[in-house]
Image (spheres, rainbow, N blue to C red):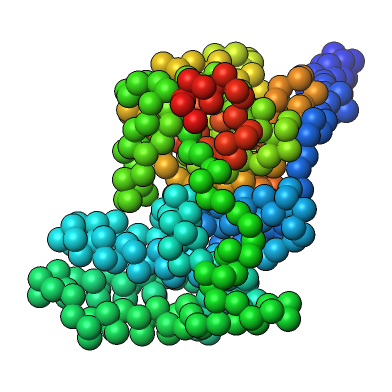
Amino acid sequence: MKKTIYAFVALVIALTPMQAQKSNKQAEVKPEGYKFTTVVSLPATPVKNQSATGTCWCFATTSFMESELLRLGKGEYDLSEMFVVRKTYENRIYDNYLRQGKGNLGEGSLSPSWIRVFNEDGLMPQEAYSGISYDSKTHNHRELQAYVDALTTVPVKMKRISQESDEVTDAVLDIYLGEIPESFTYKGQTYTPKSFATSLGLNMDDYVHITSFSHFPFYSEGVLEVPDNWEMNRFYNVPLDELIQIMDNSLNAGYTVNWDGDVSERGFSHANGVAINPDMTKIDISSMTDRARFENMSSDRSAGLSFDKPYPEIDVTQDIRQKGYEAFVTTDDHLMHVTGIVKDQNGTKYYITKNSWGTDRNPHGGYLNMSESFVRAKTIYIMVHRDAIPGEIKTKLGI
């Protein structure tokens, strides 16, 4: 009899954890996810794919200008990024020579490079200059870049740029990107790159570049010390709160924003369509689950992250932002195009952001939402139309 009782008790003890586990499993609550409400969403052209190139700066700025044309009532344009990239290669190769081979020959650049090409060389539509003159359906500049790196050493060693050297460089760019025609036909009209740019009715003097760092005076202009600013362009400097005010005012007034910043952070997930700046001190670590997702990750910054709900985020001050820049934690990684504002279920503000990584790498058609905390911490600079800047800030800047 005792053996029977003991066996029954043992069976109950053995089954209890299983029953508890089953009950817990039944009681699990599915993550609520992100629930966004649109505040403002501005027109933009279809998402493109920069593919295996470091030309985000050109794709973002081109998208921005295409939205400007939409805003101005000029219709939808598909402008050629690779025309601008081609001309920028020519500019940076010469710059590298003048710097005795110590220039920046990489593919990265900033939006002022786009403006320079527009002003000096013009522009072309995508259908007239695709920039793919090699065996590929998508952009891939790995081989082109290798040739550029190799060929540019010769003039430096020779201490002169010969006509033959220029011809060799042009031939390589022609082979990979295609020859630039003297004229082309677009929608029944014949243009040169210069006359096509003029026909768009865009004035590059209307566009202002603004940053926010405390190592040079506010309401002045300074050179950003980032590698992609190889042309040593100057940027207006404002306090962080006013940078956000400019972005918000622009978007609410119908003007999109060209954005440059750091996307190497753990909270940036294009695949999940969000970029956040989580405050680890406010995340529930009773089970270590959430915090571990952010702190115990491999070199794959998104590994283990679910991004399945809004997290508490850091209150980013000017000082926090400056320390990130000076510690090289905030770096110049990527340009994107900001086209609107949304809020999540907690009232947190995010910026609707058009990326240039194609439409099939996330479930949001190539868009993502960057939280205000992320933007405050990780913005390098923005470009906006001067009319989108609040009047009192324009006065302080002397614009």
Quadrant in which the N terminus appears: top right
How many discs appear?
0
Pick the front one: 163 or 10: 163
Q: Position of residue 27 (x, y in %)?
A: 86, 23
Question: In this orientation, does residue 383 appear?
Answer: yes
State the residue at coordinates (62%, 35%): 387
State the residue at coordinates (40%, 78%): 173
Question: In this orientation, does residue 15 appear?
Answer: no
State the residue at coordinates (57%, 19%): 392
State the residue at coordinates (45%, 45%): 333
Quarter of image, res 127: bottom right
Pick the front one: 332 or 21: 332
Asked whether, in this view, residue 384 is left or right of residue 317, the answer is right
Asked whether, in this view, residue 288 is left or right of residue 27, the answer is left
Quarter of image, res 360: bottom right
Pick the front one: 282 or 179: 179
Q: Position of residue 304 (x, y in %)?
A: 60, 39
Q: Position of residue 371 (x, y in %)?
A: 64, 29
The extreme left residue here reads 158
Q: Position of residue 191 (x, y in %)?
A: 60, 77
Quarter of image, res 90: bottom left
338 vs 219: above or below:
below
